[in-house]
Image (cartoon, grey):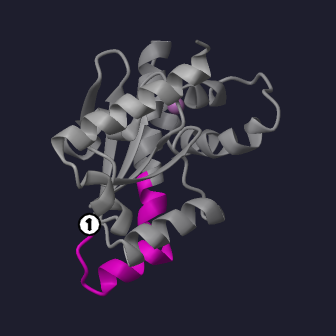
Amino acid sequence: MNKLSQIFEDNKSWAKEILSADPEFFHKLSKQQNPDYLWIGCADSRVPANQIMNLPPGDVFVHRNIANVIVHTDLNALSVIQYAVEVLEVTHIIVCGHYGCGGVKASMSEIQHGLIDNWLRHIKDVQRFHEKELTSFTDETQKFDRLCELNVLEQVRNVENTTIVKNTLSNGKELHVHAWIYDIKDGLLKDLKLI
Ligand code: CO
């Protein structure tokens, strides 16, 4: 059996397993989605939102791109945020980066990578905002780890500065924006606002 046929077989087994625990699972979900969380994460294959949080289908609305960057003119990301906040009424937006992020790493070098450099430019801006702290590192790995963290914190600010989030909060609605980072070396999440 080739790899793709295997995926269809595994999909059948997966759906069957879920139905054996809850025969109404897909039927209920087909009527509506009601997630509490919007996850904004990296497209990296090692950082799958639902699996990391151990949440089933229906529990998390997801937006992923390279290096979990939120740009004020990105209609894709803004539409996701608007729909999640205004229609689905999620109460938590989680911006989750990860250590070892290839996008963040690429932004640290002067080597050109093509079109993507225009996207990574936003992380170069993060480096510029935190130049003083980042130049104090003598260890490149520590600097890389810190830039992964700072990138999350800056992207959280970008989310908080959208008109969507600002208006939601000024209307007194409950909405929390979180800065998390995931370690691909041990599978654990960390809350950057708590450290
Ligand atoms: Co990444």
Q: Residue at x 48, y 72 (%)?
A: 82
Q: Residue at the spot x=19%, y=43% of the render?
A: 194
Query: Residue 159's quadrant in the figure?
Result: bottom left
Q: Percent from the top left, x then y, of residue 95? A: 39, 49
Residue 135 shows in the view: no
State yes or no: Cβ of the residue under disc 1 lies below 8 Å from any atom of ligand 1.
Answer: no
The total number of labels drawn is 1
Residue 116: quarter of image: top right
Work out whether residue 13 can be spotted. Answer: yes
Looking at the rendered structure, the secondary structure element under dot 1 is loop
Q: Which residue is mark 1?
A: 91
Report the side of 47 relative to 182 (left or right): right
Amino acid carrying label 1: it is Thr
Q: Is residue 163 left or right of residue 94?
A: right
* Of 161 and 15, the residue lying toward us: 15
Q: Residue 46 lies in what quarter of the image?
A: top left
Q: Which residues are magenta?
A: 156-175
**In the picture shown, does residue 62 fall above or below 92?**
above
In terms of secondary structure, what is the magenta stretch mainly? Answer: helix
* Residue 127, x across and y down, in percent: 56, 38
